[in-house]
Amino acid sequence: MSNTRNPNAIIDKSSPVGRFAPTPSGDLHFGNVLCALLAYLSVKSRGGKFIVRIEDLDKARCNAASAERAIDILARLGMHSDEPPIYQSERSNFYGEKVDALEKAGLTYPCFCTRSELLSATAPRLSDGGVVYSGACRNLNDAQKSELYKSRKPCTRVRVPDEDIVFEDKVKGEIRQNLAQRCGDFIVRRSDGVYAYQLAVAADDGDSGVTEVVRGDDLATSAPRQIWLMKFFGYTPPTYCHIPLVCDSHGRKLSKSDGDAVSYNLLRLPKERILGALAFSAGLTDADGTATLEELIETFSWDRINRNSIRLPDILCR
Ligand code: GLU
């Protein structure tokens, strides 16, 4: 049986649905919290629904405590998920159905390439550090596959069309990417059986009726793959808002691994002070003071969001 969350639900397209989807491989930093805040304000300013989704597919990298702390930090600031949080680790059957659908359409193939083969010097490099897949395993015949199966475990790739995907990002403006040339056939299931981020995100955003995705700039290059997958699955792609890099007060990029996690010490600040500082850094208010969620919902506008980089005020930095 399908474990699609709402198999019979009629999604009300007129009501905006936003989401915050942290990967609990470490604790949230204030850049993540700001992303959640903008996602929350944007849908709430239009009477919509806010969902939290925990992207814990890669069990080796994720931990339950970080997921709990993420939900707790949002709750302390007043941002509650309007539905029980979704855990990707519980939805493998659903992702499996999506990969089966791609397979039935003849769009998938096993890829046996090793990491070093993929990173070969001749592979074109992408701006996000990835490489365009060469297509080495695209047309293997059955005999070649059987031979390779003896010594290697393949991942599953999806064949992408030589097609431009174009969308209007609310922050960055028009984004255009040719899937075949700028990305290549991409992985939907890893060789260890874990479903890939692109597949899971497209399936979940579609299944939850998400109408607006707010997240960091670094994921803007993923949106075309997700839009293409969502259309294949019959979903309407959301609007995207990729927000600029969030830095500390010295201009250093925040990172989960650099000890930037939101500390409980900082959470002792009044929540209106934290919200005020976050809103100011994003460009939503004129002064670094206090603000309530209600006030911010009232005045929220994407037109005010800083387009270049976002610097957190001192008060939110270590
Ligand atoms: N899970 C991703 C992260 O924590 C975000 C995914 C998304 O918003 O699409 O970076």
Image (cartoon, rainbow, N blue to C red):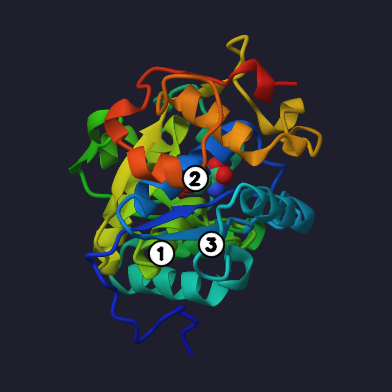
> Residue 261: x, y in percent?
73, 34
Instruction: Give how far apart the Cα atoms at labels 3 and 2 are.
Output: 14 Å
In this view, the residue farthest toward the top is: 250
Q: Which residue is mark 2?
A: 293
| Quadrant location, the C terminus | top right
Secondary structure under badge 2? helix
Q: Is mark 1 within 8 Å of ligand 1?
A: no
> Residue 22: x, y in percent?
58, 49
> Residue 218: x, y in percent?
46, 31
Query: Mark 3 vs mark 2: which is more N-terminal?
Result: 3
> Residue 13: x, y in percent?
23, 67
* Residue found 53% across the figure and 65% down from its top: 146
The foreground one among 150 and 89 is: 89
Instruction: Give how far apart the Cα atoms at labels 2 and 1 are.
Output: 30 Å
Q: Which residue is mark 1?
A: 203
Amino acid type assigned to the residue bearing label 1 in the image: Ala
* Residue found 48% across the figure and 75% down from its top: 94
Secondary structure under badge 1? helix
Pointer 2 with pointer 1, Cβ within 8 A? no
Mark 2 surroundings: few (<14), some (14-19) or many (≥20) residues within 10 A: some
Query: Mark 1 vs mark 3: which is more N-terminal?
Result: 3
Amino acid type assigned to the residue bearing label 3 in the image: Ser
* Residue found 45% across the figure and 18% down from its top: 309
Amino acid type assigned to the residue bearing label 2 in the image: Leu
